Amino acid sequence: MWRHCLLSGTVLWLAAAAPASAFMAFVSNEKGNTVSVIDTDSWTVTKTIKVGQRPRGIEFTRDGKFVMVAVGDDDTIQVIDAKKQEVVDTLPSGPDPELFTQDAAGKIMYVANENDNTVTVIDLEKRARIGDVQVGVEPEGMTISPDGKILINTSETTNMAHFIDTSTRQIVANVLVDARPRFAEFKHDGSELWVSSEIGGTVSIVDPVKHVVTGKVSFNIPGLRSEAIQPVGIGMTKDDKTAFVALGPANRIAVVDAVNHKVTKYLLVGQRVWHMAFTPDEKYLLVTNGVSNDVSVIDVAAQKVIKTIQVGELPWGVTIAPQ
Amino acid sequence: MSSITVTPSRRGFSFAEYITCLNGIVWREALRFLHQRERFISALVRPLVWLFIFAAGFRQVLGISIIPPYETYILYEVYIAPGLMAMIQLFNGMQSSLSMVYDREMGNMRTLLVSPLPRGYLLFCKLLAGTAVSLLQVYAFLVIAWLWDITPPPIGYLTVLPALVLSGLMLGALGMLISSGIKQLENFAGVMNFVIFPMFFASSALYPLWRVQEGSPMLYYVCQLNPFTHAVELIRFALYGQINWISLGVVAGCTAVFMIGAILAYDPSRGLARRGPAGGET
């Protein structure tokens, strides 16, 4: 009996002592022309992968086998094998690709080409460009509705969020938002679209059915000039209750109550915080700090910054392998 | 000057007797502290003024890089919190020494020194009592700091305790050593100008040493030699569950040196106190 107890105890102890499931985060370093790989167990950079010129938008394929990174100055998308951690392929795009998104099945990819005012449509299986959609000037933010029917692109200079029907590849609506919209994110239930405006200093809440701005999130950090508050990346928790907004040179992440659209907390991170990604278990949120060349780790439940890790030069985007 | 010497009995003293003595001294110090509400409030107001006013002004000015024990970027008020904890202990240590001067002037010290227990032990008890009072003040400050969003890990509130005891003893012993040389209560203002202010400002309490080094390499070395810097760093690391071994060594060493110095100084046969004014106790 006591042996049985001892054995069970040892198994339990070993289970408790085992590290939490580790993930691999890939960070694009815009100026360093590299991608840093971070182990989320040890919180260390385990590898730095040399990629093309000016890597920015970065995302895992839906199957978690590859990482795609938009290398703007090489006018292409590079494909990194997540296991080998090396560039294995390239995908066609228009000039200066910046951000992109995929459909739910991971078969079609939509790329915003900053210098061409177009969104390129790529068939990921055939690795071929299958069409283009003309949008506003300097397209950047890209997201797709949870039902996959509507693609959103924001154009920085036109100050619009373009609603594109994914079946016809035609723009069905344009919504004017505040100056320089950088990023767009749907709530998981599809009820709201959030668009961050870098110069406007706000996040617009858009009704995706009526195509109107229904509310705005504004930010105020005591002691900081309003010009220093420049919202960019947005991360929404799976329950749609909390959003995290990167505020660029304000060096803060705003924690926003996603129900009443009010800021509840500001978290200090590194300089010029830009984009972010949750770990699949949503325990942690990784944010890239461009000017201080590091990535900060936020404990999502505690809403606290727990660590900051040095990466390459000018980290821009981050993606974490899906489970 | 009269000196009271009591020869301890040859049988020595029991552990219970030592504890009774310790209890008496600590209890008296605690009662005195509790009855002086203004002292408690002023002990808290001082660091809070630094925290709420000084730190707020510097919040955006000072860029704090990531230095151990911190693992990410911190606000300035988070940085200065350990320095303010040490400041509470520094003032408390000096105030305890002030009370020794007062006791000597008022004649209360006679009561203490007629105890047959060894004088070194009596002084150590007095130090412990002062440190216990400083712990009360520091933990009250930590509660307010927590409300101000200065939230070290929960275990830090426990791990910082031994560091606070050691730094409290060091600063108390320093105060005791200084008090032995002070002839009158009025001279205590000099302690403020010549001990408290230089120790506090030439340390890592307000600015990280790398920043001091950028401004003045000379001042950097002064800060490195300042035992108060090491008290601050010992507290800072302990508050985050870590040990700064160099600071621990320096603080432990300084505590021993200051204590021995204070015991010698309060020894009526050869100490500094012998040169005290007429009416002095020892």
Image (cartoon, grey):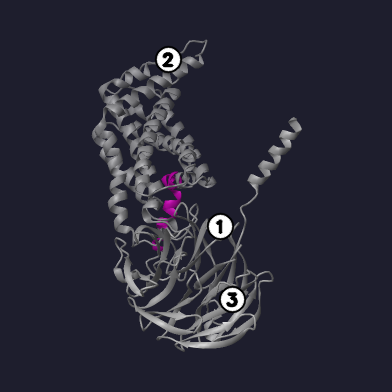
User: Badge 1 is on which residue?
Assistant: A281
Question: Looking at the figure, which quarter contains the C terminus of chain B?
Answer: top left
The percent position of residue B176, horizontal first and vertical second, equals 37, 32
Q: CA distance from mark 1 to mark 2?
A: 67 Å
User: Badge 2 is on which residue?
Assistant: B116
The subunit letter for the residue under badge 3 reads A
Question: Would residue B40 be found to the left or right of residue A116 on screen?
Answer: left
Q: Secondary structure at mark 3?
A: strand
Classify B248 as above or below A134.
above
Q: Amino acid at mark 3?
A: Met
Q: CA distance from mark 2 to mark 3?
A: 82 Å
Label 1 packing within 10 angstroms: few (<14), some (14-19), many (20+): few
Q: Secondary structure at mark 2?
A: loop
The subunit letter for the residue under badge 2 reads B
Nearer the observer: mark 2 or 3; the answer is: 3
Q: Are marks 2 and 3 on the same chain?
A: no
Nearer the observer: mark 1 or 2; the answer is: 1
- The residue range painted magenta reads B214-232
Q: Amino acid at mark 2?
A: Pro
Measuring 32% from the left and 69% from the top, which residue is drawn there? A214
Nearer the observer: mark 1 or 3; the answer is: 1
Which residue is nearer to you in this view: A317 or B70?
A317
Classify B277 as above or below B249.
above
Q: Amino acid at mark 1?
A: Asp
Q: Are marks 1 and 3 on the same chain?
A: yes
Which residue is nearer to you in this view: B82 or A185?
A185
Q: Secondary structure at mark 1?
A: loop
| Mark nearer the N terminus (1 vs 3) | 3
Measuring 35% from the left and 38% from the top, which residue is drawn there? B140
Which residue is nearer to you in this view: B266 or A302?
A302
As for residue B100 lying within the magenta part, the answer is no
Q: Which mark is residue A68?
A: 3
